[in-house]
Image (cartoon, helix red, strand yellow):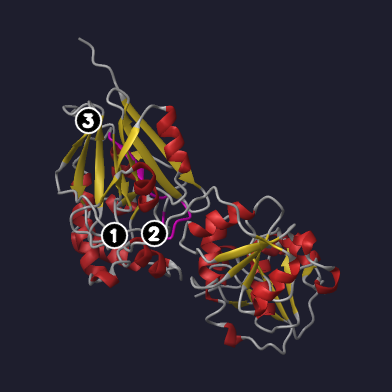
Amino acid sequence: MERVDTLVFKQYYLDCLSHASYLVGDSGSGRAVVVDPRRDVGEYIADAARLNLNIERVVETHVHADFLSGHLELAARTQARISYGSAVVVDFAVDPLPDGGKLPLGDVELEILHTPGHTPESICVVVRAHADDRVPFGVLTGDTVFVGDVGRPDLAAGAGWSAERSARALYRSTRRLLALPDATGVYPAHGSGSSCGSNLSAAHHSTIGEQRHTNHALADMAEDEFVNLVCSARTRVPRYFPFTAARNRQTRSTLDETTHVPALPFAEFLRARSTGGVVLDTRDPDAFAAGHLAASINIPLSGRFAELAGEILSADSRILLVCDPGTEREARNRLARIGFDRVSGALAAGAPGIEPGHRRIAVRHRVDAFVALDADTRVVDVRNPGEARTDGTIPGAHLIPLPELLSRINELSPDESVAVFCASGRRSSIAASILRAAGFTKVCDLQGGFASYRREHPTARRDFP
């Protein structure tokens, strides 16, 4: 008798955070789990209802550092139990999952593998369409194995694990996953652009066999060689990671992503700014350059908005939004995805609501990348070191990556003329707004960035050690 496949499997991918989450269920029984959910959980609930599934459990592969997970939101709205690996330490009630434990959903069965290394409590979830399938449908690898890389081992210092101890555990965990059949699908929690690894592919899924042959960290090597490899590949930990990791362990307020952001009339908006509110202008850099409130920080809503906000703003900042009309709620929700919840409101009517007498037109805010800058202008490259090393830079430029600008701002003088540039002109607009908010009055950024400059100066390059 032919068996009917009742497996329901859906991946949800957020490009802005390079984050993947999953709905796994059994259409026969109507039982389902959500794995590693983002904080705005409405899409999971809507899809489960459409598929006649009941979300009975939220499974977290580990305590995340790069986004605030939606376990509390899903538990509040669906009465689902929250589960982590049994090594987890959190402030709220969980139903812990033992190593080798099975979660039957009907014909579909999940098997839990403890895979410490990225964090002490990390687990992977093997998904079988039928409990006796020799080849699993796939394995949800969390941050243990990515497509093209493995998880970084240096984020568990707060749990008392050194990078070397984590790396040695990660070696054993990854080799355990390699014992799965080659046809097993690999479904990680992140893709290219995530700071949870250093060599992630743009592909959102793979197979064990493909990763066995193409993932440099899964090549046949001794444990010591693996430890040296993954520890030497570490990059800077984003500024907001410790805050978000701590919040993911705590009982906290939940997000309702459907609520409106309070609209503040201009006078009320100015009063909130005068009492310590930080003005975050989410418009395109060119629109921002045309006119904005003094001391505004410009982080465009498109792209990696929340991640950049987490690098530049403090988690306890009281945020006042200036947005293109109709995008206020999206901005609030994207900030909430990293736990930045102190959004006091948005300027009513958006940027057009700025009264003319308060509109600051930034002279020389954006200049053509082809113009000749004054000889005494300090040129600052806010790209990452790898970009400058690979693509070159403007001769004489001072390299200060955007995430380091606030901590290294004393390398620049408010009295000097400063021109900042990045690859395309987006990060440089953010950098210029940070400098002006800090009291720099002679700041411009290069429109079109280094890409435009390079087209006119194809040999412009400075070697980096």
The quadrant holding residue 318 is bottom right
For the point 58% across and 87% down, which residue is it?
A: 410
Q: Amino acid at mark 3?
A: Val
Residue at x 75% of width, y 86% of height? 376
Left or right, residue 226 beside residue 11? left
Res 135 label: 3
Instruction: Tell me whether the residue at label 1 lies in contact with that at label 2, contact meaning CB atoms closer than 8 angstroms.
Output: yes
User: Which circle's residue, 3 or 1, is located before the other in the chain?
Assistant: 1
- Left or right: 387 as drawn, with respect to 280: left
Q: Is residue 304 visible?
A: no
Percent coordinates x, y for residue 374 in the rendering: 79, 81
Amino acid type of disc 2? Cys
Amino acid, disc 1: His
Q: Which residue is mark 2?
A: 196
* For residue 364, above or below residue 195: below
Q: Earlier in the sequence, mark 2 or mark 3?
A: 3
Q: Residues within 10 Å of mark 2 (few under 14, many from 20)?
A: many
Q: Quadrant of the N terminus?
A: top left
Q: Which structural element holds mark 1?
A: loop
> Is 195 inside the magenta-drawn segment?
yes
| Spatial CA span between label 1 and label 2 | 9 Å
Foreground: 134 or 111?
111
- Above or below — where is 1 with respect to 224? above
* Residue at the spot 34% in from the left edge and 68% down from the top edge: 232
Say whether disc 1 or disc 2 marks the residue closer to the N-terminus: 1
Q: Which residue is mark 1?
A: 118
Q: Start and end of the magenta stretch?
A: 184-199
Q: Residue 433: within the magenta?
A: no
The residue positioned 54% from the left and 71% from the top of the image is 313
| Residue 324 position within the rendered picture, expressed as x and y whole percent measured from the top left | 71, 55
Q: Main secondary structure of the magenta part?
A: loop
